[in-house]
Every structure is written in C-alpha cells, then in structure tokens.
Image (tube, grey):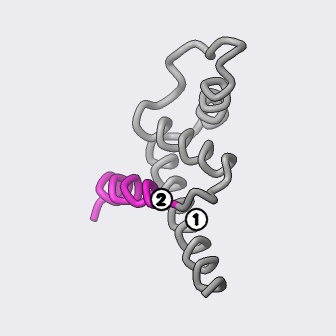
Amino acid sequence: MGLQEEFEEHAEKAKTLPDTTTNENKLLLYGLYKQATVGPVNTARPGFFDLKGKAKWDAWKVLEGKSKEEAMTDYITKVKQLLEEATAAAASTS
C-alpha cells in the first residue's frame, strides 16, 4: 500500500475517533490533513469573531514548512496513536 492510500485509509479511520478526542488533537489532525491535501495555507486568516475558523487556520499555518509526504506520515501516526489510546481507554473501563 502506498502512502496516499494509507493516508486515505486513516482519514476514514479518523472519522471513528471518540467524542472524547481533545480539541488540540482534532486541530492537529485538521492541520496535518490540510497540509497533506492542499499544501501551505492559501487563504486569509478568518476574522475576529470566527474563533473556530481562526483556530483551524492557525493549526494549519503552524505546519506550513512540512512537505505533503511528511504531513501524511505524521497524520497516519497520530490517527494510529489516538485509536490505540481510545481502544486502551475502552478496555480499561470494561
């Protein structure tokens, strides 16, 4: 399986992350996804009242120096980590 296919597979798996996933982790995944699929930020920063939009834009902007391949690899690694943590947390509550 190539990097692109593995990335797409983990993008689907990311949709199954639990609601307890922190906003920090969600923003990191968002930034990595955008960097991997679009590249460097190509839009203006959202306005003052768009707090969610600004947070997402900032999460993407901070990753600007990463190549698409690095972003894909980091995204896959982070999704795997979060899924493992969610599985471990579910097992410990059983």
Q: Give the range drawn in magenta.
A: 1-17
**Pointer 2: residues within 10 angstroms few (<14), some, or many (20+)?**
many
What's the CA distance linking mark 2 and mark 1? 10 Å
Locate residue 38, reporting x and y percent.
42, 31
For this view, does 42 lie left or right of residue 91?
A: left
| Amino acid at pointer 2 | Ile
Q: Residue 4 carries which label?
A: none
Q: Which mark is residue 82?
A: 1
> Is residue 5 located in the magenta-colored stretch of the structure?
yes
| Amino acid at pointer 1 | Leu
Query: Quadrant location of the C terminus?
Result: bottom right
Locate residue 5, reporting x and y percent.
29, 56
Q: Residue furthest front?
A: 94
Which residue sits at x=64%, y=35%? 59
Locate residue 65, reporting x and y percent.
60, 35
Seen from the viewer's position, the closer of residues 78 and 21 is: 21
